[in-house]
Amino acid sequence: MPASDTYRERAATLAGGILKQHARDVDTSGRFPRESIAALGPELLGMCVPAEFGGGGQGLRPFAAVVDALAQSCSSTAMVFVMHVSAVQAIAASATLARKSELLGDVAAGRHLTTLALSEKGSRSQFWAPVSHLVQSNGGLSVSAEKSWVTSAGNADSYVASAQKPDAASPFESTLFLVRRSDPAVRVQRAFDGLGLRGNDSSPVSLQGLGIADGDLITPQGEGAAAMLQVILPWFNIGSAAMSNGLCRAAVGATATHLQGGAFEHTGTALRDLPTLRARLADMAVRTEQAAALLDKTIGVLEREANVAPAPSAVEGPLFVLLTRLASVEAAVDVTDLAMKACGGAAYSRHMDLERIFRDARAGFVMAPTADHLREFTGRALTGLPLF
């Protein structure tokens, strides 16, 4: 059995069990999905850690399959997982981080949850452009930064964070470094209370005079932007696209079930007998499968390019990474909107999951890079312009 199927089956089992059991309460109370994250265990939390550090050594395809399955039951859990794996990739790619083997070993054993802390209050959704600076201090480095919307802010053990290097000429001369949440200089500002993804604990985090040792650096000074765009962004975009696709599948399934089970008692006509409702469901299925097919193609392009040596000078991968996330987040918005229309008043009540799925689907549209950024970057790439 292919690795992606094995991991998907494990994720689907958890999604149909413990994730589904707690998803409604997680959403209603806006609490972190502790039970679900714990249930992922070493098998899933460590699945994308390189095998040399004790992990599963899995790539983008099994990762996307797992995210899709998790999102069908609890997209807050899926989002926490996406951020964790994206941060793990930055750590795994590091040639400068001290005790990297120990840290990745803890991740592989399911003992360490990590996340990204890139976006800042001053640069908002343009996560690639931190306004904070590393400062030379007492022979070392320190930083003060206001990080915005850090997923798992109060529950992750560490953050992969960014700041401009000392004396940087522009925000693109940034550096990535590891932050331990237990450091006294780290303060989670407030609990998350949002429209959707209410369990992902996405909160502002303040770093005030945080000391950074040389061994905390994930990239050499000034090379953070390259790591963000070449390592973190592909994994995050693939993961968030898969999450949107999972939300689409959940909406299609819930709508089909409702149309099959609902009826007009006075006429004996079932909801599925109405051509307008069937047409909406058909449109939902088409958009879902189109987005999923583009994600599959994108992963195939990335897999082929990874196996070409030397790397080709002109690559399709970055373009398709932009396209697939844009297609998926927009599909999620459109598909869930159609689901609400097809299911009518029942969809607006909380006895169906559609109301939650509808809200969760909108997060991907505004999450950095936003749909507007993705469209702009894609247009620039297609016309031969640099992204920035």
Image: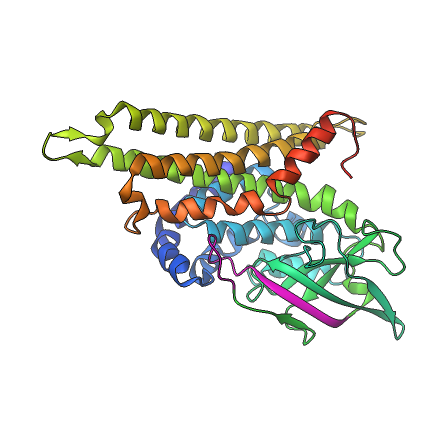
Indicate whether 193 appears above or below 363: below
Whether residue 46 can be seen here: yes
Q: Pinpoint residue 163: horizontal percent, then vertical percent.
A: 77, 58
Where, by quadrant of the figure, is residue 189 drawn? bottom right
Horizontal side of residue 108 vs 251, given as left or right? right
Kindly give the residue lying farthest to the left in the view shown: 266
The stretch in magenta equals 192-210
Residue in view at x 30 percent, y 28 percent: 277
The image quadrant where one finds the C terminus is: top right
Q: Identify the image's colour scheme: rainbow, by chain, secondary structure or one colour.
A: rainbow
Of 243 and 133, nearer the camera is 133
Does the magenta-highlighted stretch encompass residue 205?
A: yes
Q: Pinpoint residue 73: horizontal percent, then vertical percent.
A: 40, 47
Whether residue 5 can be seen here: no
Where, by quadrant of the figure, is residue 313 drawn? top right
Of 346 and 164, nearer the camera is 346
Residue in view at x 75 percent, y 71 percent: 210
Indicate whether 38 appears above or below 68: below
Indicate whether 100 appears above or below 289: below
Of 43 and 372, nearer the camera is 372
Horizontal side of residue 157 vs 310, given as left or right? left
Horizontal side of residue 77 vs 263, given as left or right? right
Q: Pinpoint residue 244: horizontal percent, then vertical percent.
A: 50, 40
Where, by quadrant of the figure, is residue 340 drawn? top left
Residue in view at x 47 percent, y 60 percent: 38
Residue in view at x 71 percent, y 58 percent: 122
Does the magenta-highlighted stretch encompass residue 177?
A: no
Q: Pinpoint residue 147: horizontal percent, then vertical percent.
A: 67, 61
- Count of residue discs: 0
